[in-house]
Amino acid sequence: RVLFRSKYSVFNYEEIPAGYYYRVMMEGSPPHRFWHYEKFREVARRVPRGAKLLDFGCGPGSFLDVVGSERADVSAVGVDIAGRQIDFAETQVGAKYPRERIFFQKVEENVERLPFADASFDVVTSIEVIEHIHPYHAIRFLLEARRLLKPDGLLLVTTPNYRSLWPLIEWGLELTSPVKYHEQHISKFTPNAFVKFLETAGFA
């Protein structure tokens, strides 16, 4: 008999207003603006010059807006299953840049392969996404990232470190935000566990 069963998801992301996190980055309180924008800038700095980039779980396009404004040498596509966020990203972010530089594409939730050829990208990014999805889906994403990356490609993933002060920070952020992170974070990684998780998918 089944003693315990984990949930594949615990939150309906279509409930989040379109563009919510983009507006937090642009118009939120100073701590929220700093947190979001500097995080994206730090990832953007690590993207090699002239790279072709895929942003997995792009949401409303916040990161690719930073890439578009600060890395004119980089071209990128953002993908997400949240249709309302993709619509926002296309109209509010994608419209600011030539399509050959920045564009967005909705993908179906259970799609086996993204609509891109093998070894199409120099960089795959996923920023504060992997903690929101079940490990089964996370491994599938990482395997797909390996397919899409060139042999010398770079995977850039960020996720909260639950062996740091993050649980306390999370509690504080929830006091000033309608977003409840404890409801959304399914996979809570420590550095050691995350390294092993990436190695399981074949990354070094």
Image (tube, rainbow, N blue to C red):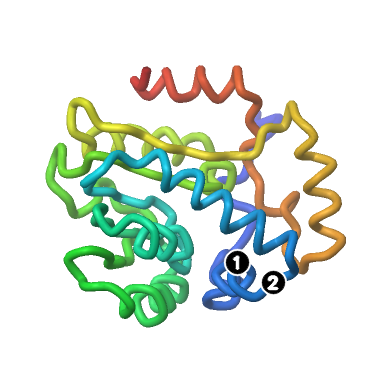
Q: Can residue 5 be seen in this view?
A: no
Which residue is denoted by mark 2 in the rendering? Answer: 28
Residue 201: x percent and y percent? 37, 24
Which residue is denoted by mark 1 in the rendering? Answer: 25
In contact (CB < 8 Å): disc 2 and disc 1? yes
What is the three-letter code of the residue carrying label 2?
A: Gly
What is the three-letter code of the residue carrying label 1?
A: Met
For the residue carrying disc 2, how many other residues have a C-alpha within 10 Å: few (<14), some (14-19), or many (20+)?
some
- Front-most of residues 119 and 102: 102
Asked if residue 84 is positioned above or below residue 25 in the image, the reply reads: below
Q: How many labels does the image show?
A: 2
SS category of the residue bearing label 1: helix
- Residue at the spot 32% in from the left edge and 74% down from the top edge: 94
Asked if residue 168 is positioned above or below residue 58 in the image, the reply reads: above
Please tell me in which quadrant of the rendered image residue 150 appears: top left
- Residue at the spot 36% in from the left edge and 22% down from the top edge: 203
- Residue at the spot 31% in from the left edge and 67% down from the top edge: 104
SS category of the residue bearing label 2: loop
- Which quadrant would the N terminus be assigned to in this image? top right
